[in-house]
Amino acid sequence: MPDARRFRRRLTVVAPLAAAGSLLLTALPAAAITGGAGVGDPYFPDDGNSGYDVTHYDVHLGYDPAHPDHLDGDTTVTARATEDLDRFDLDLKGFRIGTVTVNGRPAREVTRSGAHELVVTPAGRLPAGRPFTVRVTYAGTPDHEGWHTLQDGGADAIGEPHGATSWFPSNDHPSDKATFGLTVTVPDGWTAIGNGVPGRTTSGGGRTTYRWSEDRPMATYLATVAIDRFTVQKYALPDGTPVIDAYSPGALTDPATPALQAEIISFLSSKFGPYPFDSAGGIAINGITDEGTPLALETQGRPTYSGALFDVSMVHEITHQWFGDSVSFTDWRDGCIAECFAQYANQLWDEHLGADLDTGFYQWVLEGNRDNPTFWDVPLYDAGPGTELDPALYDKGSLMMHALRRYVGDDTFFATLKRWTADHAYGNASWPAFEKLAAQVSGKDLNGFFRAWAHSTVIPPQKYLYPGSLAKLRPGAH
Ligand SMILES: [Zn+2]
């Protein structure tokens, strides 16, 4: 987690000098202590906020597909002040703000600033170390960065890296993870799907209210709600973990999906360690009307897909449950701790189905791009703002994973992955920490390997392209 104190704003008060040249100062008015407008992300300095740590979100929404340009929200954020606070920020884009209360008392002042800052001045100072709650009611048209309308009027909330600001006030940065409760009221006949496990569903006055809870800490961009006339399928994994799949009208359903999804989770668990969440499943959305919406996103415990639950996208998004969701970014330079692994998992799955990765995937992709400098010119760590999820993290990233596996050997490679997911479960970690762990578990100096693969903008030298058992495949080797 970045050092929030570096970014704290203190309003300094200049004391008037006493008369006659005395250096004695008159009584200083107490300085106002305010949380920062950003948590200090190198790429998105305004994302998240400093001065507090969120423990839980309780998000209540009202949505009517007959009026898809309108969302009613009532969100309570439970947090702990990490310093004395006279004022703090939440991240929320747009909306008309109704009431804002802090610990049940109306806020003294609420203002907006920047792209998404909601600046709250509570009635009194919030003492460091103490919990507090802030409740915000809001209504209006959600911003389309993270809120997407479906053709039939339904809606889907997904957006990385900062889509959460489009639908609930938050500390919008993956370094501040929190548990999550969601309550959504929609007209009868519509269904609301969220993260985690379902709670009670109640009906009255032509409306149905759905409740969901995610009891494992979750980064804000992994929170989701999907509203549609869903077909819902419920079953369980062999260990009893509940699975809930939801299909929009027109999305492809396949009777083989439940068994396939269970097999994928079982296979990935054998490689990465126990499945980290209390629920599983997928949401197959159909008919998103705005362009630029991600085709799929690893929304926690229940990834979101476009049109169907295909094996390729299920393997990728379910892998994120370990890499990216349970173990989250420290900041947005860390894309590789999610995408490099998720993309390589598709190769692991192909291998499980019989593929030879050395002579197939690895040699084919590597040699096919040997003379293509743009394939190599993005570093996998710290890829840059706006390119934090550059295609290199997927393409070059999965090659690096295979090269690392061959460099350290299968046993060491998979032991490293299991150590990583266990050591950082439900927390945050950075790519440099992975490099360190890989070196520690293998007992090898991996500095040269990682410098060439993860930090360089040119093709790695031959010894890192074809290490270990790959050496026999070097062009020219016999
Ligand atoms: Zn991904």
Image (cartoon, helix red, strand yellow):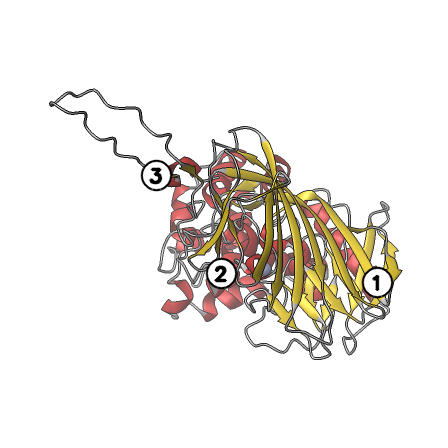
Residue position for label 3:
11
Which percent across, then down, holds residue 350? Answer: 67, 62
Examine the rendered structure and indicate whether residue 155 appears above or below residue 210.
below
In depth, the one of 240 and 403 nearer the eye is 240
Q: Secondary structure at mark 1?
A: strand
User: Is label 3 or label 1 in front?
Assistant: 3
Which circle marks residue 446 in the picture? none
Measured in 3D between alpha carbons, the distance from the residue under mark 2 to the one under mark 1, in whole angstroms, is 38 Å
| x 46%, y 67%: residue | 367
User: Is label 2 or label 3 in front?
Assistant: 3
In depth, the one of 17 and 197 nearer the eye is 17
Examine the rendered structure and indicate whether residue 22 appears above or below residue 159.
above
Which percent across, then down, holds residue 73? Answer: 66, 58
User: Is 399 placed left or right of 113 in the picture?
Assistant: right
User: Is 294 placed left or right of 204 in the picture?
Assistant: left
| x 38%, y 48%: residue | 451
Which amino acid type corresponds to the residue marked 1 in the rendered image? Answer: Thr
| x 39%, y 70%: residue | 372
Q: Secondary structure at mark 2?
A: loop
Examine the rendered structure and indicate whether residue 295 appears above or below residue 114.
below
Query: Which callout, 3 or 1, points at the residue further toward the start of the chain?
Result: 3
Residue position for label 1:
208
Q: Residues within 10 Å of mark 2 (few under 14, many from 20)?
A: many
Q: Residues within 10 Å of mark 3 (few under 14, many from 20)?
A: few
Label 2 CB, ligand 1: below 8 Å?
A: yes
| x 69%, y 79%: residue | 151
Residue position for label 2:
389
Quadrant of the image where one finds ligand 1: bottom right
User: Is 254 placed left or right of 128 in the picture?
Assistant: right
